[in-house]
Amino acid sequence: MGRYLRPLLRGTTYTRLLHLCVPMFLVSFWMFIDPSRPWAPAVFLVPLGLIPAVRTGEGAQARLLLVPADAQPGFSEAPSATWRDRLRTVVWLEARMALGAAAMFACVWLPTLVYDLVMRAGGRSSAEVPLLFGTATGWWLALLVPVPLIALYGVVVGLGELATVVARGLLGPSAAERLAALEERTEQLLERNRVARELHDSIGHALTVAVVQAGAARTAGDPLFTDHALAAIEETGRSALTDLERVLGVLREPRRPASGRPTLSEAHRLLDSARASGAQIDAKVTGPVEAVPGLVSREGYRILQEALTNVLRHAGAVPIAVRVDVGGGLLRLEVRNPLTAITPGGPGSGSGLRGIRERAALLGGRASTGPAAGEWRIRAELPLS
């Protein structure tokens, strides 16, 4: 029994009833103007529903009154973009008025019927409310009181549920809106993956350089070298903190532009950091690096960063050959180092190497990692267009 009475304790039941009764205010106002044409408000709703902004307002009302506690109400938040959306809005307005008329009539007539039954059961006849039993009176009429009460319950709860179902069907997002929402969700997932790669590449590079520097300083036992190593660790840490703050800013403000991310024109920071770790860097840059498009340049920077981090982490301070070439519609990156006993054993090992291939693939390029001619080689080709 309690389960059936529970809807009467929910506020949503009464906000839905209010939502249905709102159009009746227009009808009541019209009845003062021309009661001979009660159908006129329904005609007026046709041009009203063709106004694109009306769909936005109806969607807002539906979210607020029909499903106030639903985190994903499923109603359109945009104006009508097509004639199909406009016609759906017109149909919804007409359906809302019809349901509102039924709700208003039932909420007025059924309580009056209950009152009349009670009065007749007490022996007092009333002619205001017509009954199947004419002017009959008697205690047995009290047995009929639950019937209109149950009907009133069905109207209050059932019409609210029906209005919600109809609203979801007629005010729900169109195919174009669903596609746009899906694309936005996809963009958010891609952004989260990008942020994860950013953290891995930036913080991983800084920690790798710091570990290599600290190990070299401890092994060297030279105060001058130790001071130099500490200065390099400080600079690398400061750069990592800047990157971390920028990435966290993207999380706090998802629509922040990516222009603050480092590009290949700042690749000297990576090379200097690797040199400070004791690695011998042979770098050669050809072509107009500054003219590389921003997105390609930023991803190229991260690929180069991860490639250097991979060498320092797995091979230590070894000679590293870095080649950056721009030309023929491609950005080519290559990092080579001698194979050592602790160099990674295969082209698929490590999330960093996988991240390099993912970055290249997202831009329509390709990347390869693995041993070649006694060296460990990481090579990437990114299209400039």
Image (cartoon, rainbow, N blue to C red):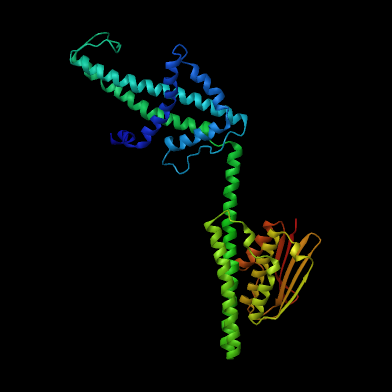
- Please tell me which residue lies in front, 346 or 62: 62
- Please tell me which residue lies in front, 83 or 312: 83
Residue 221 percent across, percent down from the top left: 57, 91
Residue 185 percent across, percent down from the top left: 57, 48
Q: Is residue 355 left or right of residue 24?
A: right
Q: Quadrant of the N terminus?
A: top left
Q: Quadrant of residue 272?
A: bottom right
Q: Is residue 291 above or below residue 133?
A: below
Q: Is residue 144 visible?
A: no
- Please tell me which residue lies in front, 290 or 106: 290
Q: Is residue 192 above or below residue 137?
A: below
Q: How many marks?
A: 0
Q: Residue visible at 39% across and 28% down? A: 158
Residue 50 percent across, percent down from the top left: 58, 27
Q: Is residue 86 left or right of residue 299?
A: left
Q: Residue visible at 25% across and 8% down? A: 135
- Please tell me which residue lies in front, 280 or 150: 280
Q: Quadrant of residue 347?
A: bottom right
Q: Is residue 267 above or below residue 14?
A: below
Residue 15 percent across, percent down from the top left: 38, 34
Q: Is residue 263 visible?
A: yes
Q: Quadrant of the C terminus?
A: bottom right
Q: Is residue 15 left or right of residue 51?
A: left
Q: Residue visible at 71% across and 67% down? A: 265
Q: Residue furthest top?
A: 134
